[in-house]
Amino acid sequence: MTDTSEKLDYSKTLYLPQTEFPMRAGLPQKEPQIVARWEEMNLYKKLRESAAGRPSYVLHDGPPYANGNIHIGHALNKVLKDVITRSFQMRGFDSNYVPGWDCHGLPIEWKIEEENYRSKGKPKPDLTDPGAMIAFRKECRAYAEHWISVQSGEFKRLGITGDFDNPYTTMNFHAEARIAGELLKFAMSDQLYRGSKPVMWSVVERTALAEAEVEYHEVESDTIWVKFPVSAGDGLTDAFVVIWTTTPWTIPGNRAISFSSRVEYGLYEVTSAENDFGPRPGEKLIFADKLAEESFAKAKLGYTKLRPVSAKELAAITCRHPLHDLGYDFPVPLIDGDHVTDDAGTGFVHTAPSHGREDFDAWMHHARDLEARGISSAIPFPVDDAGYFTKDAPGFGPDREGGPARVIDDHGKKGDANKAVIEALIAADRLFARGRIKHDYPHSWRSKKPVIFRNTPQW
């Protein structure tokens, strides 16, 4: 009878393979040794020499930013590329992989500001000063060089094979000179011109942002209904076209009013007014029929519809700018726009081509027709990179007592631009109504501060 209390060593009953290999290949010790051996024998050079004369295979490497340690995304990216280049090398190609780094743009500048200034309570350099700008660029260059060195070592530890001694970098002076040279070729062949286009702009970061760099947060904003007096239009010269906007500061940039031929419009007359402020009885206003009741209720006005207004009549209308007396002495045409609906507002869209992509597209679509009518299609630059009004915004720019009004300040706070524009509209008796509204508004994903649309020079 067996004594079951005795413990059995079952491992001795199994025929397991025997090996001198260390557990888990001893990788923590072996990896640095393997990398050092590859470096010592100059493996990359030997691969190039053995592949000399073969058909070339080039993988153009989309570069990472040189602004920190690599992460799992970098590792996955580089390992997959290494598999591809090695496989082509083994198939008889000269597969020369040249790594690269992106050293330009906001990520590096933002890191320098964060580490060298904000975290130490130091003010951001005044980049309008050439000396400060050059010093700041040197800081950015040194920062990028440091992280290129660090990331190179990390990629080598992953076993990546490449020409790490001769990478390409966007901050390479020779590369920058080549770019300038290629641009000059376009200029010399008369294929280059300077235009402009509105972009999303971060005042805090002083840079344009792509759609992917923007996130939306709910904010509460001023909203206004503005009256544009009709200056030309059969039977409508005693009326006003009313627009609605959540960005009062863009009114100085207004150059047109968009309507839709798919929307039904009407001419309305004010019959009574509860407030001393705003339209008075007898005033005639043009609205989309679907939105008239809501708009008049907002202004606490009684009204009656006089007659419909056709799209043909609207297309023939020209208005005066509501701030005409401040220096906005130019015609404001009505243009047909595909982006116009009667879902909200008045059925008319305040069109400031300097401050919105849809506005810009609608304006440029009609530019040739406007020029034929004697209306300049030039697009102004009402707001500068710091969020201040310029000379293209008379009454709010450098000519304003106390200095130019500002849309957003350096800390992302709302400036005095909205207040200044609203007060000017009230003084000109061009405000139909005003209010507040909660809506989603674009913010920079880095600074978390609001951005604006502003016209910028483009090549």
Image (tube, grey):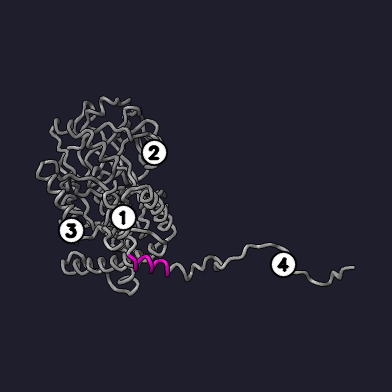
The answer to whether the residues at label 4 and label 2 have Cβ atoms under 8 Å apart is no
Residue nearest the observer in this picture, 216 or 23: 23
Asked if labels 4 and 3 touch by Cβ distance under 8 angstroms, the answer is no
The residues tagged by marks 4 and 2 sit, at their Cα atoms, a distance apart of: 82 Å
Q: Earlier in the sequence, mark 4 or mark 2?
A: 4
Q: Does the magenta stretch mainly form a helix, a strand or a loop?
A: helix
Give the magenta-colored segment's residue range. Answer: 33-41
Name the spot of residue 233 as percent of width and height, x first. 21, 28
Q: Magenta stretch containing residue 258, yes or no?
A: no
Q: Which residue is mark 2?
A: 344
Residue 415 appears in view: no
Q: Residue at x 26, y 46 (%)?
A: 355
Q: Quadrant of residue 239?
A: top left
Residue at x-position 18% and y-position 54%: 390
Name the residue at 16% across, 41% down: 378
Amino acid type assigned to the residue bearing label 3 in the image: His
- On residue 458, which mark appears? none
Q: Which residue is mark 4?
A: 12
Q: CA distance from mark 4 to mark 1?
A: 51 Å
Let me know if residue 36 is in the magenta part.
Answer: yes
Labels 4, 2: front one: 4
Q: Residues within 10 Å of mark 2 (few under 14, many from 20)?
A: some
Q: Does the image show residue 134?
A: yes
Q: Secondary structure at mark 1?
A: helix
Ranked by sequence position, the earlier of labels 1 and 2 is: 1
- Amino acid at dot 1: Ser
Residue marked by disc 3:
174
